[in-house]
Every structure is written in C-alpha cells, then in structure tokens.
Amino acid sequence: MSEHKEFLLSVVVPVYNESAGLLEFHKSLLKQIEKVAKNGYEIIYCDDGSSDETAKIVRELHKDNPKIKLIRLSRNFGKESALSAGIHAATGDAILMIDGDGQYPVELIPDFIAKWQTGSDVVVGIRSSNKGEGWFKKIGSHYFYKLFNRLTGEKLIPRSTDFRLIDRNVQEAFITLGETDRMTRVLIDWLGFSRSFIDFEANARSSGPAGYNRRKLVKLATHSFVSMTPVPLFLFGYLGVFITAGALLLGGSVLIEQILLDDPWHWKFTGTAMIGILLLFLVGIVLMAQGMLSLYISHIHSQAKQRPLYVIDYENSAGIRKV
Ligand code: UDP
Ligand code: MG
C-alpha cells in the first residue's frame, strides 16, 4: 500500500427517485468530501432510471461544479447495477460508495479515508441498527445471512452494507467480474484483499419510501443464492433419493408381508395403496434424475458466470499494478 498523501477520491452514489432529499444529501456529502479530499475528488451520481427530477438536479449541480458527474441508466436496473456502473467509471485512487437517501452517515467518511490510508484495501460499513426497519427486513436479513453462509461456505458479515470504500486495485479486480445478477457487496467480499470495518448507526431515510420493496428484496436474495451456490439445485436430488428409498422399503415390506407371507399381520394393503407406493417410487426416480441433471447444469452455471479463477493483488514481474 502506497502513501496516499495526494489522492483522488471517487464517490459513487446510486440514486433512484431521490429528488426530494437529494440537494440536502449532496450538501452534507460535499462538506465532508471537501474536508478530506482537498487534492481532488469526483462525485458520480448513478441515476438508476429515475422518473422524477433526480437527473435534472444532478445536471444542475454539474454546471456549477464539473467534479459532480452523472451516469444515467436507460431504465431502472436496480441498485446493484447502478452501483457497478459507478464503480466501473470511477477514476479515483479510492472509491467510496454511499446511498443517496441519507441513511449512511456522511460524517464517517473521514474515518473511511483514514482506514484506507493506513493500509486497508476495503473498508466496510457495518450497520448496528436501522431505525424504522420493518419485521420482514429484520427477520429476512437475519436468516438470509445464516442460510447464505451455510450453503455457500462464504463468510458474509451480517449487517455489512454497501457503505464502503475500495482501493483502486479492488476496483480493477471488480471490473473483471462479468456477472449480470450481482450483489455488489457479495462480489467485493469474494474478491478478498485486506479489509477493515467501521460500525455505524443508520439514519432514517431522509425522504420518501425505500426503493427496495419486499418483492425486490426477495429477488435480490434469490439471485445471490443462485449466483453463489448450486446447492438448492441438489436439494431435489437428495429428496429424490430419500423418497425412492422410502418407496422401496414400503414396497418391499408389502411384497413380503402381503404377497409372499399372505398378510400374517393383517395390514390389508389395498390396490390403491400399492399404486400410491409405485407412484412415490416413480416420483423419487424423476427427482433423482433431476438432481443428476443439476450436477451438469451447475457445471455449466459456474462456467457461464465466467468469473476469473483467481485475482492478482500484486504482480512484480509484469509491473502493471500498484507500488
Ligand atoms: N436505488 C437505486 N435503484 C433502485 C433502488 C434504489 O439506485 O432500484 C438507490 C436509492 O436511491 C438509494 C440506494 O439505492 O440511494 C438504496 O436504496 P434504498 O434506500 O431504497 O434501499 P435500502 O436502504 O432499503 O437498502
Ligand atoms: Mg436506504
């Protein structure tokens, strides 16, 4: 890690229909940024296809101060895509991501910079609480992290947020990731690099309802699973093995007890029951076949994602990267 006495800071802000609170947010952000990045900064607002005045407001800001930039997506792609667009475009030595709804405390930005300057490539904001968060989000996120870490073997940190700062090296590695259904913080965690953490308490949204409704959150969670692990695919295969084994056991005992021994225990299995067992057996076979298919699909799946096999942090010989 080099000394960052003179550095350019990029701030990436995804915004979707935030016009009501945007100016206020921008003012508080700018105050902090001018404090820490005297030598240069850029603030990139990524407008995620807003239908309100969001883009117009940013255009006005840009007129007065060209360091304030706008990337406007052609439609609403979701926060993750907006964030990625900003990260890809950033030209700074460090890239800070922050939501444009005022929920992340801008006062902590100097702390993020300080941690970066003392050698962390990734500085992650950890939310200690979220005022006004509904039960669905609370319970949902608790179990999401539990299940996610269990199934994928990853170590996502509960309550870690997109309020993050990444070094230019991390950005370069991030750019090589070609996944379409993405969750930015999962990808950044996957990349590795040296990390440190900053705890903070989230503010209530400065205005308007959260752009992420339940349906979107469930979709995001599902995509994160699918992009990180094929295990859900295999579950049906296991279920098939279980059902087939059960059906064989049942069928076998009927065969012996009823047909071979002439029903000594008076089970009196009807023809319908036997057809039931046969059906169960066939369903089991079908599920097992599906599980087998899943194995192949999971190979295609991991190949289709085209993630690089590894990421180079430091390379001396080629001399293409840092220090
Ligand atoms: N956002 C976005 N696209 C969307 C939804 C949200 O760019 O489709 C932005 C939004 O403007 C805000 C940030 O992403 O700056 C976080 O959104 P929100 O506050 O709705 O999510 P939460 O705080 O509940 O995670
Ligand atoms: Mg928010």
Image (cartoon, grey):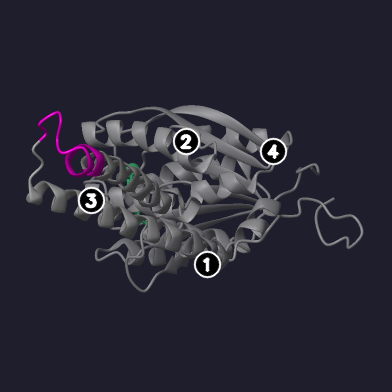
Residue 93 seen from this side:
no
Q: Earlier in the sequence, mark 4 or mark 2?
A: 2
- Indicate the amino acid at tag 4: Ser
Q: Which mark is residue 150?
A: 2
Amino acid identity at mark 3: Leu
Q: Position of residue 222 (x, y in %)?
A: 35, 51
Q: Regarding mark 2 in the picture, which secondary structure is present there?
A: helix
Q: Is residue 83 left or right of residue 243?
A: right
- Please give the residue where the numbered disc 1 appears in the rendered image: 300
Magenta residue span: 255-267
Ligand 2: image quarter:
top left
Which secondary structure, mark 3? helix
Q: CA distance from mark 1 to mark 3?
A: 30 Å
The residue labelled by disc 3 is: 280
The first of marks 1 and 2 along the sequence is 2
Q: Is residue 204 above or below residue 9?
A: above
Camera-side residue of 291 and 156:
291
Q: Nearer the viewer, mark 4 or mark 2?
A: 2
